[in-house]
Amino acid sequence: MSTAYLKCNDNYPAGCVTAIEHVLYRQGITHFKYDVIHKYIKIVYDGKTVTLNQLLKKVEEIGYILKVIDINKKDE
């Protein structure tokens, strides 16, 4: 499994974070956590099934931009 930390460019309200969470779970992530104070998202996903770029593209398709701030690739 791989872990990525993603920074929200804007201060997204709870509904927007929920929309991001739902689209990522539909793409196959196994864990999602949003840090409200520091405004970053932690996701865990299987890099053999889906790439981080594919996940980011799906989020962009629903209108949100996330920047990668750290990646921990354990399954490669």
Image (spheres, rainbow, N blue to C red):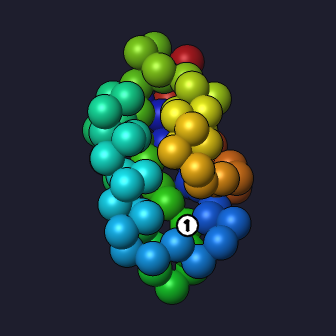
Nearer the observer, 1 or 18: 18
Residue 44 quadrant: top left
Residue 45 visible at all: yes
**Residue placed under numbered mark 1 in the picture:** 40
Q: Is residue 30 above or below residue 28?
A: below
- Which residue sits at x=31%, y=33%? 26
Residue 72 visible at all: no
Q: Is residue 31 above or below residue 7?
A: above
Nearer the observer, 45 or 57: 57
Nearer the observer, 56 or 30: 56
Q: Is residue 20 above or below residue 76?
A: below
Location of residue 14 in the rendering, given as x and y in whole percent from the top left corner = 37, 74
Crowd rating for badge 1 (residues with CA inside 10 Å; few <14, some 14–19, many 20+): many
Instruction: Check disc 1 and report its element: helix, strand or loop.
Output: strand
How many discs appear? Answer: 1
Residue type beneath disc 1:
Tyr
Q: Is residue 66 above or below residue 16?
A: above
Location of residue 35 in the rendering, given as x and y in whole percent from the top left corner = 45, 73
* 36 displayed left or right of 31: right
* 59 displayed left or right of 9: left
Quadrant housing the N terminus: top left
Q: Residue farthest to the top?
A: 48
Location of residue 15 in the rendering, given as x and y in whole percent from the top left corner = 36, 69
- Which residue sits at x=69%, y=66%? 9
Residue 51 quadrant: top right
- Which residue sits at x=55%, y=67%? 40
- Which residue sits at x=57%, y=38%? 61
Location of residue 45 in the rendering, given as x and y in whole percent from the top left corner = 40, 33
Quadrant housing the C terminus: top right
